[in-house]
Amino acid sequence: MIARCLAAIGLAAVAGAPPAWTPPRTPDGHPDLQGVWTNATITPLERPRELGAKEFFTPEEAAEDRKRALVPLPTAQRGGTEAHYEFTQFGLDRSQAQIAFSLRTSMIVGPEGRVPPLTPEAQQRNAERAARNKGHEFDGPENRGIQERCIVWGNEGPPMLPPGYNSFLQIVQTPAYVMIEQEMIHDGRIIPLDGRPHLPPSIRRWLGDSRGRWEGDTLVVDTTNFTDQTNFRGSRENLHVVERLTRVDDDTIRYEFTVDDPTTWTASWSAELPLVKDKGPIYEYACHEANYGMANNLKGARAKEKADEGAKKDNQQ
């Protein structure tokens, strides 16, 4: 019944596949996850507080939410990353893009539907870091975020969350590896499947160190060894992510993840969202080209320092 209701309003049936459906398989017998997928969604990571413990919309409520969320907004009314482009000009507005729809009211699962509170240790750590950087935000590129420096886009993960636009990823499989490429700053995670252990703790990576295995028809990816510049909602080098990818129909992968860091959150937490097949291709995201903001910010800081130094000398005379 739910599957028919979802189909009637154009939503992907992400809660489970019909019993008769079996996934296509690669020559080595595992489910074929290959192709271009999108995780663009209108579902927020955290549940709006006014929804309380309501974890799912009804099909009718989901259709209304979809209708409301996909109305294009004038550029002047947009915030965040959407302010610097006229998205409709490039076919990137949410009303034009392939969307991974769900009945969920939040990606985070469970009655709370929100990220657990930070531990006292994490609160103190974040406050100390902010205090050290205060007044030095524009000393040099090292003081800016790694996303602004075009090193790693924060949503690339893991866990993989939808960015503001260009929410595409490509999966390629071999018997020994799975590769997941995300075009925002075009990073590819090469995930070995041969049971090798994680790298030693002394070796850290921007996207962590991922190890994969098959549990039935589900690809499970375990990732550790993040850097101390990682910043996933306050968690840094101690972040531990377990992802689960299950193809549930021709056009949908159910993507689940659990994150854990006892030095950051008072409990581990989990989320779920669909990946929906896209015809592709993925177009290049050229992060550094015309990235005037970084140079202009630092140039402005140097000009202010020079002006302050001149004013100081004038006051001493």
Image (tube, rainbow, N blue to C red):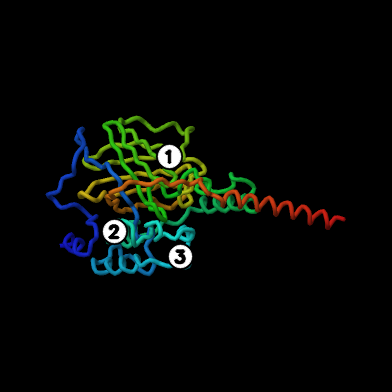
Residue 30 vs 311, above or below: the answer is above
**Number of residues whose C-alpha sits closer than 10 Å to that of mark 2, classed few (under 14), some (14–19) or many (20 or more):** many
Look at discs 3 and 2 and give the one toward the viewer.
3
x, y percent for residue 298: 63, 49
Q: Nearer the viewer, residue 84 or 262?
A: 84
Reading the chain from its start, which is encountered first: label 3 or label 1? 3
Residue 75: numbered disc? 3
Amino acid found under the numbered disc labelled 1: Gly
- For the point 22% across and 42% down, the residue is 217
At numbered mark 2, what does the secondary structure look like: helix, strand or loop?
loop
Task: Give the mark nearer the N terminus: 1 vs 2.
Answer: 2
Q: Return the residue at label 2.
A: 101
- CB-based contact (under 8 Å), mark 1 and mark 2: no
Residue under pointer 1: 208
Name the residue type under label 2: Phe
Estimate the spatial distance between the alpha carbons at disc 1 and disc 2, rounded to whole Å.
28 Å
